[in-house]
Amino acid sequence: SNRDHRMTMRNQWRLAIFLYLIPFSSSLAAQASSSDGVPNSRVKPSNPSTERRTGGERSVTQIATSMKNTSSLVNPPQDLYTEAFIQRKSKRKNRRIRNSSAPVVDSTLLRFLSEQKVEAQSQFTAEQQVASSSTTQELDKETWIQQFLYENVKRVLIENGAPKSLAHDASMVVQSYVLARIKNRRIRYFLKKRDIEWEKGADANSALEDPCLKDPEYGLQDIIETLLEFQLTGHDIAVILKHTPGITLMMPRPYSQYPKDMRDGETLYDTVSRAYNGVLLGSLGLRKHDAKKILRSCPGLLTLRGSKRAEDVLTLMTSLGVSIKSLSRTKATLPVLLSRSPSSMFRLVSFLASDALRIPVKNIGPLLRGKDSFALINSVSPVSSNSSVNLNRNMEEERILINEQYRKMSETAWTLRNKIGTQDLSKVVSIYPSVLLLNAEEQILPAATYLMNDLGVCENDLPRILQLYPFLLGRDIKSMQAVVDYLLSLGVKEEDLSSIFRAFPSLLTKDKDTMKPVVAFLEEIGIVNVGRFITRLPPILGYSVENDIKPKWEYLSKVCLYPSFELSTFPAYFSYPLDRVIKTRYEYLKFVKKVPTDLLALDLVLRHGDKDFAELVANDIDGGKRFATFARLRKEIKNKELRLKREQQKRNKAFQRKLDSKKT
């Protein structure tokens, strides 16, 4: 405590001053005895009664003043080691010692732990042998702990329809958890018993009963039956036991089915009702299939604390402007949000809305709901593991790591605002939330330096580029340089790189292997100068050959007489939507205006807007109304055809399922 620390420091200063004054006092005493002839016995010793009134303490000033008198320097200060001082020190020490508990760690505890280790190993081996030899026996003939061993748990799960591999994993987790809990309870019982013996004697522990000797009247089978009441399958139960084995030791049924002395805490039935029926089916309005999927992927939701946390997180998200319907639609993010601590989520919201980032509160909810925020949420709000009992879990260490992470995120935000020049950090974080997890000195500043020095991006353009595409900050410099070298090898001029990356910075995040099929296809269709083509249309390196480039090329080959030449003069053709723009305009010219399209220039058909196209190319005089009506009717017909196609696919799948069920 602080009081003990002050007393220790005070005694250390006393001793230091005493040791420092010994040489001076002895030399001055010798001078005094040789000059005046005064014997040492004439020095008056310290008075204990005076020390008792003054507290036995002398300041440095008092000792220095007493050095002026030769008689006081003959002997060292006596009040440091007088009998009264020692008695006062022992009284203060006794007041600091607890009178009602034994030492925290002693030889008895160490012997107990060593014996428990040997006993646990032997007991575990014996119980495994008994469990393996009695798999066909009834559960009521076994001991209470024995039903949680690997073989028994696996047998029960497989009987309820769980896969063997999943039942194996869940059984191992349940066995480890239960044995660790039993060991924990025995250690707590031993410590409590030892403290009672320390206080009242060895005969005072008769009223203290070992909690491990009193087995509950419910077991694993009751837990399984309770979960089955909520229409959970064996697969669902095995997954839940794998990530939340603590439910195996909960009281399964409501209170009315057990005596009053056993009605302690909340039952598993109440917890599952709150989480499954209340939160997932009730508040979120999920279907049973989706609710079961959330239970399988959300650790701790079927615990008392986890279910209440889920309710608080839902309240927090709705207060941030996120609707329940939007939460229920994003089923992939629900397990991430519902398994978090409400206090840690509120701290993250406060940080995002603080002066460091200045994100509007209405934008924080949609930000946390997205998949891109998973890494950010995991860094400041980690999920506690429920797979085993960690006896040495250091919560203080986790708190220190989270505080350190917030400090680093503050430094990153300050670097982006002051050194990079990005003023609107809300857009940057909304696009790329993991930017806050980047190291300012090792990732952000080197990436910005590379863009300005090696690629020629102007300092004034850098904040705009990073605000539009902040993923560049998390990109490795070697990977970006590999993209630059590949473009130079294709014939792109070095002076054009700055304009290309300023207009399309996403190219720096592409992989060279994904760009090679595009280049090969361009060379296949007759594009001679690929570097010039890429300079005029850089985004083409990110297009899909099968889904985007090839269908457009095949349609162009049908409507144009010289498609390769038209592409060389107008590479932007690949950037237009095929059905909504390209096909609609060519079909309007061919079927409505009766205009031959073979010799029409490609850029003449596509470079104008809809109104200008109708007036300048199709020669309409109604301001483009006729073309707009044609485009609308064509879209309705296409949507109807697509809807009928999807319905036919659903009917085919249903018919195939019926055939498969008949075969089985």
Image: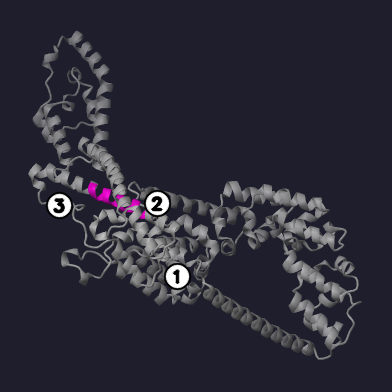
Image location (x, y in percent) of residue 383: 42, 57
Image location (x, y in percent) of residue 568: 87, 65
Does residue 612 show up?
Answer: no
Q: Is residue 594 magenta?
A: no
Q: Is residue 177 magenta?
A: yes
Residue 410 located left or right of residue 480 = left
First of labels 3, 1 by sequence position = 3
Residue at label 1? 317
Report the span colored magenta: 173-186
Three-letter code, disc 3: Glu
Residue at label 3? 209
Kind of element beneath mark 3? loop
First of labels 2, 3 by sequence position = 3
Residue 273 located left or right of residue 348 = left
Quadrant of the frame with the N terminus = top left
Query: Residue visible at 74% across and 78% down?
Result: 580
The quarter holding residue 51 reads top left
In the figure, 319 relative to 476: above or below? below
First of labels 1, 2 by sequence position = 1
Crowding near pointer 1: few (<14 within 10 Å), some, many (20+)? many
